[in-house]
Image (cartoon, grey):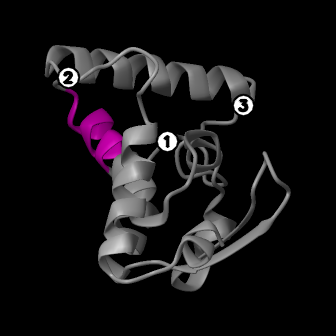
């Protein structure tokens, strides 16, 4: 991948997942309104549970700088179905990971969520705290 805008968008998406533990579909569909004032505020699509989490200042700045052609969303341009957008991001991520010899079938963006969990365990957080 040589397009610097695309590289910065993928880097920001990975940082968001590693820094928050968000599922890829919530990350791709995040609205700028969801990250205002340095806080992540969303409702999980799978569980319907609210997530309120303080963002690292550097991550917040990085996310606010992402360009996608639609001022409402961070990553999604809003021009195609949300599930299609997630599929495109996953396809491109699979290609990047394949090129780097890091792709394992059936285990793609979950790696970034796992990194978040490992970090939280290392900080002494309980399973309940991490799940919340």
Looking at the figure, which quarter contains the N terminus?
Answer: top left
Q: Circle 2 is placed at which residue position?
A: 1
Q: Residues within 10 Å of mark 1 (few under 14, many from 20)?
A: some
Q: Circle 1 is placed at which residue position?
A: 68
88 in relation to 115, above or below: above
Q: Circle 3 is placed at which residue position?
A: 82
- The image quadrant of residue 37 is bottom right
Q: Secondary structure beneath disc 1?
A: loop
132 in relation to 57, above or below: above
The residue segment tinted magenta is 3-11
Earlier in the chain: of badge 1 and badge 3, it is 1
Residue 9 counted in the magenta span:
yes
Q: Residues within 10 Å of mark 2 (few under 14, many from 20)?
A: few
In terms of secondary structure, what is the magenta stretch mainly? helix
Instruction: Indicate left or right for 36 with 47 as reference.
Output: left
**Which residue shows up at 39% across the image and 61% down it?**
116
Q: CA distance from mark 1 to mark 3?
A: 14 Å
Q: Position of residue 15 (x, y in %)?
A: 34, 56
129 in relation to 101, above or below: below
Earlier in the chain: of badge 2 and badge 1, it is 2
């Amino acid at each position: 991948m040589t397009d610097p805008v695309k590289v910065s968008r993928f880097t920001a998406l990975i940082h968001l997942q590693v820094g928050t533990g968000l599922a890829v579909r919530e990350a791709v569909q995040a609205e700028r309104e969801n990250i205002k004032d340095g806080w992540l505020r969303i409702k999980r699509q799978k569980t319907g549970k609210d997530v309120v989490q303080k963002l690292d200042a550097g991550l917040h700045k990085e996310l606010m700088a992402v360009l996608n052609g639609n001022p409402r969303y961070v990553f999604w341009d809003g021009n195609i179905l949300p599930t299609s957008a997630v599929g495109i991001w996953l396809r491109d991520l699979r290609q990047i990971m394949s090129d780097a010899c890091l792709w394992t079938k059936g285990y793609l963006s979950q790696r970034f969520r796992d990194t978040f969990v490992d970090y939280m365990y290392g900080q002494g957080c309980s399973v309940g705290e991490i799940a919340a």
